[in-house]
Image (cartoon, rainbow, N blue to C red):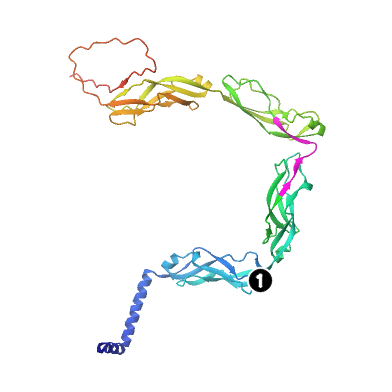
Amino acid sequence: MRLLRLWVRDIINNWDSFLMAFFLALIVWIIAVEQEDPIIVADVPTPIPVQYINLGADLTILGDPVDNVRVRVRAQRSIVQALDASAFQAYVDLAEKGPGVHTLPIQVEGPREVKILNVQPPKAVVHIERLAEKEVTVRVEIMDYPPLGYMVRQDSITVDPMTVTVKGPESEVSKVVAAVAEVYVQGERSTIQTTVALSPRDKENLPVFDCTVDPPVAHVVVPIEPQPGFAEVPVVPRTHGRPADGYRVSSISVDPPTVTLRGNPQALQKLPGYIETEPLDISGATQDIVERLPLRVPENVSILGSKTAVVTVRIVPLEGGKTVVRPLKVQGMPEGMIVNVPIRSVQIILAGPLPKLNSLGPDDVQAILDLSTISGEGVFTLKPQILTPSDIRVEAVIPEEIQIEVRAPTPTPTPTTTPTTTPLSTGTPSALTPIPHIYQPTPTPTPTP
């Protein structure tokens, strides 16, 4: 107890010194914190969306008020670096605000350790109006035209629903006189049934914004039918002759594929339902033929547009098959090794255009046995590689795989007797006879001293 009294008395007697030491320690701590994580001023990198709250139930906002703000803050660097728009709330309070134009402050709230220095823009101009709604009719507008020879039956267009409700600011709703469904009929030759979004329009047929339509879409039926005295018929291309031997016609096309005829309704009814081109001669053809030909126009009938058509005849070679036998060409021999290839040749089944198959030469198709991927001794299974022209396909190779043996050469003692020469057979072996084929390095001759 005595020690406590002495300690308290000592503090009282040295109060000035105690306060000085405390403030010096506080200043040192602040400087240390400031150096490690200084306080900085910076802008929040992303804009903050503005909310409009407490708007009366029978009121709405007209136009586009401020939708986001930029904010400048002051805080420690580590805190500022972690900030984004989600850390803040920006709002305009519309409580007790009635119809009219109001200039109101934009309030921004953020984390407690962050001081908000500036908000841009600081205020928002808000135009408030009463909500209104009214019922208007739905009007269908045809935006373009069907093909020549067809017409839209305007008196038979139907729409469902026939009336809709328009909602929005009172001044905008009062401008709306109809909800318009726009329908496009270009290229259509039969009745259209479609669902179209509705647009509120004023008496000048201009869109009225800030309004909604309920329901927002309508189902529209637009009848399209041929006009009297017009008929659209297909164009039939005519050819005569045959392509060259080994070739065939793969397709015939015509442009335009249809034409519109105009004439007396009785004359149109007598037509066979199509119109022909003049015949195209394809005799001896070996490649595609493209030619513009006149159309055969019936009497008392005229053609709207060009009286010719472009006919394209595709000529392709006949496909066929062929079997050839080719010797194996060994590549990539392992250095210093003996390779035993039991098969000298392979049978190759080819497919492709007959003229190309019939003109193949010995060097056009080759069988390669590539040994560059193997190393060491042993038995290996390889697939022959077949080289062919680009338009010839390989259907099969017989045999598909070949087993080869690779071994190191065995040293042979010097013979002491004269070898006997055996005459070679004069017969020709079959191309597929599996006679072993031994590949070995050629011995290097010993120089004579």
**Quadrant in which the C terminus is drawn:** top left
Residue 264 seen from this side: no
For residue 272, side relative to residue 69 (left or right): right
| Residue name at image x 47 percent, y 70 percent | 111
* Residue named by callout 1: 101
Judging depth in this view, the residue of 78 and 249 nearest the camera is 249
Residue nearest the viewer, comparing 48 with 407: 407
Element assignment for label 1: strand
**Residue at the image point whose x is 57% and y is 67% from the top:** 51
Residue 282 position within the rendered picture, expressed as x and y whole percent measured from the top left: 64, 22
The number of discs equals 1
Residue 358 appears in the picture as rendered: yes
Q: Position of residue 332 (x, y in %)?
A: 34, 28
Residue 13 % position (x, y): 30, 90
Q: Amino acid at mark 1?
A: Val
- Taking depth in this image into account, of 247 and 179 the one nearest to the observer is 179
Asked whether, in this view, residue 424 is left or right of residue 167, the answer is left
Residue range of the region highlighted in magenta in the rendering: 220-235
Q: Is residue 110 left or right of residue 258?
A: left
Quadrant assignment, res 279? top right
Q: Quadrant of residue 12?
A: bottom left
As for residue 225 lying within the magenta part, the answer is yes
Q: Nearer the viewer, residue 185 or 119?
A: 185
